[in-house]
Structures are given as C-alpha cells and as structure tokens.
Image (tube, rainbow, N blue to C red):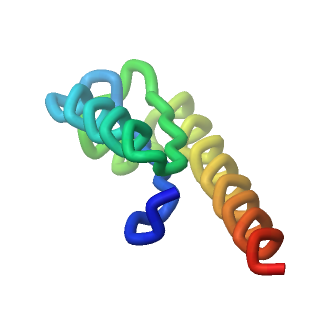
Amino acid sequence: MNSKVCPTYIVAAELDVLRDEAFAYAKQLKVHGIAVETHTILGAPHGFIHFMSIHQGIGQATDDIIKGFASFVRDVINTQSQLAA
C-alpha cells in the first residue's frame, strides 16, 4: 500500500454530474494499491445530503453511508494496528 495516500471511502450520487469522476478516481487509487470503498446513492443528485430531512430514502441512505464509513475507519485502524504490532 502506498503510505502517502490513506484508504479512501467514496460516496457518489447516482444523478451527480461528477459521478463518473468519482468512479475514475476510485479506479486510479485501486490501480496504485490504495484501499478504496465506493458507494452509490441511487436516485440522488449532487448535494443529496441536504435533502435527507425531506426525503426518507435519502435520509436512510445517508444513515447507511455514515455507518459504513464508521466501519471502514474501524477496519483501517485495526489493520494499521496489526501491521504496527
């Protein structure tokens, strides 16, 4: 793993004009051996997090990505701790 770039968690909105760039970035990171986890929020536009209070599905998806991110960070920390031991 490249020590200059940290493991990366990418969330892309399905309807975001930058969605393809997010996936291209994830692909490049993987090519260089960086741990990457990607998630797509279906039916959501760029800035979807601002709609979570008025759209139940986006609110639930936001909850899921937050929980997923927390799990991702725990796994990264545990892996780094094991490597350091």
In front of the other: 4 or 24: 4
Task: Using the rendered view, name the quadrant where residue 5 is placed.
Answer: bottom left
Q: Where does the image place residue 42, in percent across and percent down from the top left?
A: 44, 21
In front of the other: 3 or 8: 3
Q: Is residue 53 visible?
A: no
Q: Is residue 62 above or below residue 56?
A: below
Residue extending furthest left?
17
Q: Where does the image place residue 80, in percent across and percent down from the top left?
A: 71, 70
Q: Is residue 27 visible?
A: yes
Q: Residue at x 47, y 50 (%)?
A: 34
Q: Residue at x 15, y 29 (%)?
A: 17
Residue 32 lies left or right of residue 34; in this view the side is left
Task: Using the rendered view, name the quadrant where residue 2 is placed.
Answer: bottom left
Q: Residue at x 67, y 62 (%)?
A: 76
Residue 48 lies left or right of residue 11; in this view the side is left
Q: Is residue 15 above or below residue 74?
A: above
Q: Where does the image place residue 10, in percent across and percent down from the top left?
A: 43, 45
Q: Is residue 10 above or below residue 73?
A: above
Q: Residue at x 34, y 50 (%)?
A: 50
Q: Where does the image place residue 46, in percent across and percent down from the top left?
A: 24, 38
Query: How many numbered marks does the figure carry?
Result: 0
Specify the quadrant that holds the C terminus.
Answer: bottom right
Residue extending furthest bottom?
85
Residue 52 lies left or right of residue 27; in this view the side is right
